[in-house]
Amino acid sequence: MKKEFNTVRKLYTLCILVEDVPGVLSQVSRLFSRKGYNIESIVSGATDKPGITRISIEIMCEELMIEQIAAQCRKLLPVKAVKILDEETCIRREIALIKVRAEDRAARNEIIQLVNIFRAKVIDVGKESLTIWVFGSQSKNTALIETLEDFGILEIAKTGTIAIERGQSTIYDESKLREEYEFGKNVR
Amino acid sequence: MKIPATQAIMECLLEQDVDTVFGYPGGTILNLYDELYRYQDRIHHVLTAHEQGAAHAADGYARSTGKVGVCFATSGPGATNLTTGIATAYLDSSPVVFITCNVGENLLGKDAFQEVDITGIAMPITKATFLVRDAQTIPDVMRQAFAVAASGRPGPVLIDFLKNVTAPSIEIEYEFIPWQQNRTCASIQDLNRSHQLKNPEPDRQDVETLLEMIAQAERPLLLCGGGVVRGRANRQFREFAEKLDAPVAITVMGGGGFPGGHPLTTGMIGMHGSRASNQACAECDLLIAVGCRFSDRVALDPATFAKQAKIVQIDIDRAEIDKNVLTDHHIIGSARRVLEMLNANLPQYDHTAWKEHILPLRAPSVAEDTPVLTPQQVLEVLRTQAPEDAIVATDVGQHQMWAIKYLHFNYPGQLLTSGGFGTMGFGLGAAIGAQIGNPDKRVLHITGDGCFRMNCHELSTVEHYGLPIITVVFNNGTLGMVRQWQSLIYGKRYSATTLDRGPDFVKLAEAYGLRGFRVTCRAEMEEALAQALSCGTGAVIDCMLDMDEMVRPMVAAGSPITDFLLD
């Protein structure tokens, strides 16, 4: 039987463990650009293993496309493990730093109240501005940003989305690092 | 033992049994060439006229011998001249190690003279690139590069040495380890664990499933792809085909994987595939593709491709599964290993009814007797007069399709053609590489007047090294394949395809010190080929053909495989 692929575009997060060598990020990101896909966000950071970096890429695409990109990605020499995560199976978080205009006391108070509701934090207070730190899901952060727009946003710095699988399973389950990982086994 | 870094590079080549390298020197690679001078008794360097020629030669050497080809070039333009050759090798999965040198560490990234980020440029067209900044890593990098190029699905690898790494004063710790043993070095093992440099062992259950599918099939069709050739699995494939008793269609890259004159073969499949192959593809109920990636020239329309069939893909590269055509079943592994496992449990089948339906569709391949020379006549003369095991290198276009249609290829490496990348100018370079790798064999270079013009300067290499390569130019005064499309699809508006210009290829051959012949009819062709075969030097046979001759049959790009535009 032919494998059925979901043809609906949705948001996938591709988590990739790579050796920390020069050019690895461009090797990985190239796979998306060559297919004409725009990366929504990309985050690269250290892991618990020395010399191994985790790259999280968020992308809007169809299942077949993400499967193919993942397959090409596994062929890259510095790539140790690849896992495709989608909304149902993972937790996604991002951080935003928002500098917002707060020219008078009333505005300031109102902003601080909002910040508390969203469990965000004020991390810098200027004479006419506040800088807010918010951590959470993309929808929560977007909601806060939208409410702050009324005051006048001066600048936003956002991380991309990082993601991890729910429950016990980890990226190492399907990892090239593990000896029992069998190349010859079927993909399904 | 401490030895100079450049010496270590040469020793690493010897570790891999490399005795021939192709290349072109220049400023930054001088240190390497200086060392090569000392190694000239053990490593034969072939100087080409252009780096592209060197890249194609290394590729042709690799394809025809099954060994890893090696090609040197300098930084900047030397390196970028390689890129077409690298991409050609990549698309056709040919194992070649390209070695370039870059400017020194102190100049890196400063747009120095002849500096280019070649590892960046080559990234999308290689299996791996290595930028060597530390001389101590040379042995590891060299061993890894060869291991990566040759293992799994083969392909090109690029190593870029900074000039200071190759400085004569640099010494490194080195111990000679032959390649059979150095695959067990710690550094390679690391790679092995993460990247499976061994060929993947096919899953037994997958093989069983295919055997069951075969038992249920009434109209099976086999597809012989480039994987059979690269994996040198021709014997296993033949045994499989004969036991299965099914028609065999051959892709362009599969040429040589299955005997061209075998009673089961239906010839080429795809855009210029035979009616037998394409019809069989449309009607079969089980399609077993071995080492084939269903490119757009084979599966012209993926949605209707073999739509009555269960499609089974046997490939060494998992990323090829479900890429172009969705499959019903697949087996990951080398063609040879998978076919061995299948053959071990495959009973003898009899599909006479199905064969009797498909095989008669094969067109008789006898050239018509006409006063003007036709492509088929040229090829018939080549087929009957040239040695049967002659290696054939082609360029790209009409002559390529005719050559593959009308000549028979019987062993892997007999046909050298740029199937994936479609590189005009590939043929002569590849022929040079093949002749150097196979001094006992006759090498024929089949080209068109457009393609030949692109790299004909390599005739100087043919002459210098005394290579008896016979170049057969299908000279129709036009870019034939493009003209064919213009005739059929673009209302005969021949935009920039007419080649009403020089040079005179006979005089050109003579200018390079080779024999030149011009032929206008079959008898002249027979005479010229006889002379070329016996003259002992390279020769060019300029065959004057009609410009409106077309490659038949033809299916338009993207159309169902049996919608013939031309019969």
Image (cartoon, rainbow, N blue to C red):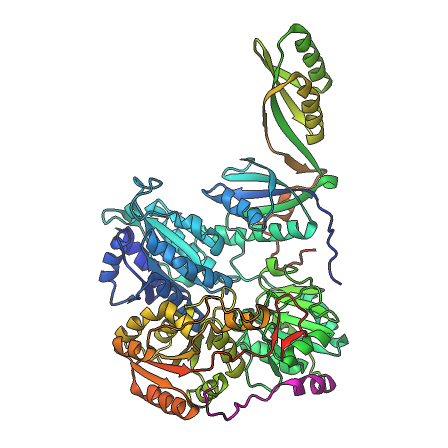
**Residue B343 seen in the figure:** no
Image quadrant in which the C terminus of chain B is located: bottom right
Question: Which quarter of the figure has residue A136?
Answer: top right
| Left or right side of A9 for B268 | left
Outermost residue to the top? A105
**Residue A6 seen in the figure:** yes
* Residue at left offset 38%, top offset 55%: B80
| Nearer to me, B51 or B333 | B51
* Residue at left offset 34%, top offset 71%: B456
Question: Which quarter of the figure has residue A102?
Answer: top right
Up-down relation of residue A84 to residue B555 (above or below): above
| Left or right side of B10 for B181 | right
* Residue at left offset 38%, top offset 59%: B82
Relative image position of residue B343 (x, y in whole percent): 64, 76
Residue B325 forms part of the magenta stretch: no
Question: Which quarter of the figure has residue B283?
Answer: bottom right
Up-down relation of residue A134 to residue B190 (above or below): above
Per the rendered image, the range of residues in magenta is B352-373
* Residue at left offset 51%, top offset 68%: B419
| Nearer to me, B85 or A128 | A128
Residue B362 forms part of the magenta stretch: yes
Relative image position of residue B514 (x, y in whole percent): 28, 79
Relative image position of residue A149 (x, y in whole percent): 67, 21
Up-down relation of residue B103 to residue B339 (above or below): above
| Numbered label tally | 0
Relative image position of residue A174 (x, y in whole percent): 64, 48
